[in-house]
């Protein structure tokens, strides 16, 4: 039922047949294989599976994206985009890893000087300027 | 510390007579004998346990199986100074004995006398407490709340839903929910499990920690509480404010 090696330490798992609507928050790791609309906030890691679809602003310490994400993505440490990923929105991260075939449609701020912005509404529109506020 | 022993109704059968006599002798030898109450059609758990507590009992021991312990826990939940013990008797429905590290029969008396206690959380569904889990089957609407926010879960197909406090998430050797982490774990498993042509990851279950879950459905949705009581949707499942002090064994799994 659960992939033991991939869910160790994962506090929240959204399976392929579940759609979440609202503000999904966690202090632990989140794994999404289904769909989410709203906001996702975690102090841990976010993993988005290949078939997953997210229309939300995301804040996480680390993120691994293999599916579709529409919204702004603010990652305090490492963001990894898999070959099957498609991100539409602005990205702020300290370290960015983009695999061959990944699609990123939006602006990207990187490095230790990049700061995490507070989550805005997930309207799909790009922010006009990066807002300099420290991560919570 | 006055003890009160509540015998489940199935122990009235003649085949349990000798075992109960030996049990009572062992309890006397250990110095933890107490009053005995027997569940019958005319005497409910609530009546017997509340009367015992009024008479001064501060340790109520469920003698029977998982259902016996669950019923006692529901009544004792409202009594903060009462400790719950358990003596498993009978082969069926003894998962709690495994989880709490309590051996069957006479050996459980020694666990009781050593009095190693754990404080565990309780769940609450509408006005009833539950110790283990709540299960339902179907495609209801679920609204989850925790300390960080609220969100709605929409299921694209019928699911088996299990909200665990102190129970295994799935199979007999599956992971065990932690009753001391201040959350309930909601496990949502697609009803039609993996077909032969599906990859294993296509039958993933969802796991969501919650503090409150509202279940509602346009169809009839019976919800089973601790394996025996049934309530109907809509229902609100929360982490109860009350906690339960349980006597446990050293080899407990929680």
Image (spheres, rainbow, N blue to C red):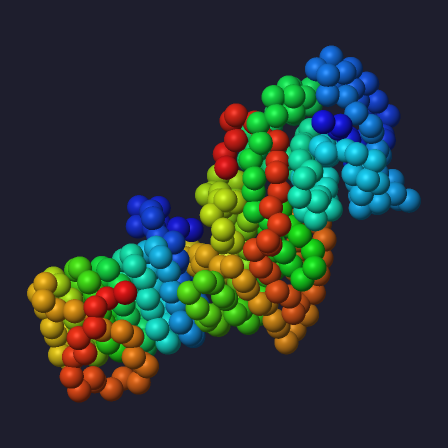
Q: Residue at x 23, y 66 (%)?
A: A135
The percent coordinates of residue B118 (x first, y second) are: 55, 35
Total label count?
A: 0
For the residue pair B145 and A33, the one nearer the viewer reads as B145
Q: Residue at x 53, y 69 (%)?
A: B142
The percent coordinates of residue A134 (x first, y second) are: 21, 68
Q: Residue at x 33, y 47 (%)?
A: A8
Compared to residue B164, the image places residue A66 above or below, namely below
Q: Residue furthest top?
A: B29
The percent coordinates of residue B234 (x first, y second) are: 65, 69
Q: In the image, A13: left or right of B238?
A: left
The percent coordinates of residue B97 (x first, y second) are: 61, 32
- Answer with the quarter of the image where residue B51 lies: top right
Q: Residue furthest right?
A: B42
Q: Residue at x 34, y 55 (%)?
A: A28
Q: In the image, B78: left or right of B178?
A: right
Screen quadrant of the N terminus of chain B: top right
Q: Is residue A58 visible?
A: yes
Q: In the image, B31: left or right of B201?
A: right
Q: Is residue A80 visible?
A: no
Compared to residue B206, the image places residue B252 above or below, namely above
- Answer with the quarter of the image where residue B110 lies: top right
For the residue pair B181 and B170, the one nearer the viewer reads as B181
């Amino acid at each position: 039922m659960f992939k033991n090696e991939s869910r160790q330490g994962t506090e929240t798992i959204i399976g392929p047949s579940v759609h979440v609507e609202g503000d999904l928050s966690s202090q632990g790791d989140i794994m999404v294989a289904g769909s989410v609309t709203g906001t996702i906030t975690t102090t841990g890691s976010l993993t988005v599976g290949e078939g997953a679809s997210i229309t939300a602003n995301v804040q996480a310490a680390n993120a691994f994206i293999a599916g579709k994400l529409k919204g702004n993505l603010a990652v305090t440490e490492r963001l990894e985009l898999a070959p099957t990923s498609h991100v539409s929105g602005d990205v702020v991260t300290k370290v960015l890893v983009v695999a061959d075939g990944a699609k990123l449609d939006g602006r990207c701020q990187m490095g230790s000087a990049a700061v995490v912005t507070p989550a805005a509404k997930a309207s799909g529109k790009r922010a006009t300027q990066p807002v300099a506020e420290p991560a919570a | 510390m006055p003890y009160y022993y509540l015998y489940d109704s199935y122990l009235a059968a003649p085949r349990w007579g000798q075992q109960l006599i030996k049990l009572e002798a062992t309890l006397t030898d250990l110095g933890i004998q107490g009053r005995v109450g027997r569940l019958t059609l005319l005497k409910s758990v609530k009546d017997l346990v509340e009367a015992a507590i009024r008479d001064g009992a501060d340790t109520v021991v469920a003698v029977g199986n998982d259902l016996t312990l669950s019923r006692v826990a529901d009544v004792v939940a409202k009594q903060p100074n009462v400790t719950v013990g358990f003596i498993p008797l009978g082969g069926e429905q003894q998962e709690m004995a495994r989880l709490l590290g309590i051996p069957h029969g006479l050996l459980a008396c020694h666990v009781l006398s050593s009095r190693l206690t754990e404080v565990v959380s309780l769940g609450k569904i509408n006005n009833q407490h539950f110790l283990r889990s709540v299960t339902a089957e179907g495609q209801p609407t679920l609204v989850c709340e925790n300390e960080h926010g609220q969100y709605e879960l929409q299921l694209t197909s019928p699911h088996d839903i299990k909200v665990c406090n102190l129970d295994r998430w799935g199979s007999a050797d599956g992971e065990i929910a932690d009753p001391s982490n201040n959350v309930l774990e909601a496990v949502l498993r697609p009803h039609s499990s993996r077909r032969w042509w599906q990859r294993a990851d296509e039958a993933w279950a969802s796991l969501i920690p919650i503090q409150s879950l509202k279940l509602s459905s346009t169809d009839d949705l019976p919800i089973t509480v601790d394996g025996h009581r049934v309530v109907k949707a809509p229902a609100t499942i929360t982490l109860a404010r009350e906690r339960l002090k349980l006597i446990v064994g050293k080899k407990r799994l929680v």
